[in-house]
């Protein structure tokens, strides 16, 4: 299970993406997510898919490893596809059987929505795979810095988001251990009705919640023992600075905006 979770994991490297400023990557992810929802035709989605593949190549990570991030959400993607095929009507009729029909708009919408989910998950995974939790926290804090003038606890928010991302693979690993332990004791999670399978998750959920609370308490005690007092007066060993790579990211964002805006109908 842990191998199928890419979001929250960090893979050290020397690639273009690894050495880019986390602020530029965070801003680009926001821009990319906006463009994904603005795209509404085959050409615009082809541009976004091509750019995502190019980004995966620039990360110098295994493409198969990056694509594993889609496994946890494949059920949601399949459900979305089936839902649109059944509900969305309009256009040419591809198949008709009584009240059930597969029509052009349903197929088109199912493909576009599944691409949206896939692209968002892949780009989010690339962000965490190429950005260390420390850099991600500092980037978030620097971007949200202006809100601190209005009393917003910027450092605390950035720290909580970073810890939440970091704990995703940790909790998945803990879940995998609990499932193996319960299976060794005779539990069955793969057979029976849907209700029975849902009930079988209770022996997993309870120890998982206990483990999560225990880890949170241990983390809080460790931070206090090391004198953590928030972002007030905090110094940094390595300061963030923009480089030519971040300028290239900004230019790429402008090109994508122009391309999607040109092909959007």
Image (cartoon, helix red, strand yellow):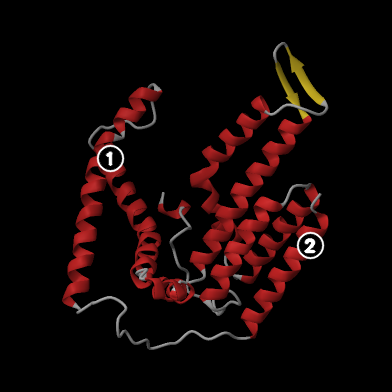
Nearer to me, 150 or 18: 150
**Which element is circle 1 on?**
helix
156 and 150: which one is in front? 150
Q: Measured from the top left, where is residue 171 in percent x and y?
A: 33, 53
Which-is-in-front pick, marks 1 and 2?
2
Residue position for label 2: 259
What is the quadrant of residue 20 in the picture?
A: bottom right
- Please tell me which of labels 1 and 2 falls first in the chain: 1
How far, Cα to Cα, is label 1 from label 2?
47 Å
Up the image or down, 15 lies above or below 221; here it is: below
Query: Quadrant of residue 197 in the image?
Result: top left
Query: At 69% from the left edge and 69% from the top edge, which residue is drawn?
Result: 253
Number of callouts in the render? 2
Using residue 77 as the reference point, say whether residue 199 is left or right of it: left
Q: Quadrant of residue 200?
A: top left
- In this view, the residue farthest toward the front is 150
**Residue 129's x, y, as percent?**
50, 66
Is residue 102 depicted above or below 64 in this figure? above
Q: CB of mark 1 within 8 Å of CB of mark 2? A: no
At horizontal 80% and vertical 25% (from top left) the residue drawn is: 94
In the rendered structure, the answer to whether residue 93 lies left or right of residue 100 reads right
Q: Residue at x 73, y 52 (%)?
A: 45
Residue 70 or 91: which is nearer the viewer? 91
Residue drawn 38% across the image and 57% down it: 169
Q: Where is residue 126 in the image (x, y as percent from the top left)?
A: 55, 63
Image vertical order of residue 49 relative to residue 231, above or below? above
Question: What residue is disc 1 on?
Answer: 204
Using a 10 Å C-alpha cutoff, classify the residue at mark 1 as few (fewer than 14 neighbours), some (14 to 19) or many (20 or more).
some
Q: Residues within 10 Å of mark 2 (few under 14, many from 20)?
A: some
Height in image: 195 above or below 245? above
What is the secondary structure assignment of the residue under circle 2? Answer: helix
């Amino acid at each position: 299970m842990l191998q199928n979770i890419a979001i929250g994991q960090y893979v050290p490297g020397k690639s273009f993406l690894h050495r880019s400023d986390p602020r530029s990557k965070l801003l680009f992810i926001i821009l990319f997510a906006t463009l994904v929802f603005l795209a509404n035709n085959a050409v615009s989605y082809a541009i976004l898919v091509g750019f995502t593949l190019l980004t995966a190549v620039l990360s110098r990570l295994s493409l198969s490893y990056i694509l594993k991030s889609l496994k946890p959400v494949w059920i949601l993607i399949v459900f979305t596809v089936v839902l649109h095929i059944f509900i969305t009507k309009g256009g040419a009729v591809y198949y008709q059987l009584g009240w059930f029909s597969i029509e052009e708009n349903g197929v088109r919408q199912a493909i576009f929505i599944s691409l949206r989910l896939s692209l968002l998950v892949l780009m989010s995974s690339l962000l965490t795979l190429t950005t260390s939790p420390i850099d991600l926290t500092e980037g978030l804090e620097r971007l949200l810095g202006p809100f601190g003038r209005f009393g917003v606890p910027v450092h605390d928010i950035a720290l909580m988001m970073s810890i939440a991302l970091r704990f995703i693979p940790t909790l998945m690993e803990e879940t995998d251990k609990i499932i193996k332990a319960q299976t060794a004791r005779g539990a069955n999670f793969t057979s029976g009705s849907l209700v029975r399978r849902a009930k079988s998750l209770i022996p997993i959920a309870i120890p998982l919640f206990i483990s999560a609370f225990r880890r949170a308490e241990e983390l809080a005690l460790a931070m206090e023992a090391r004198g953590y007092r928030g972002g007030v007066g905090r110094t940094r060993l390595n300061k963030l600075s923009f480089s030519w790579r971040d300028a290239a990211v900004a230019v790429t964002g402008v090109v994508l905006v122009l391309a999607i805006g040109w092909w959007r109908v």
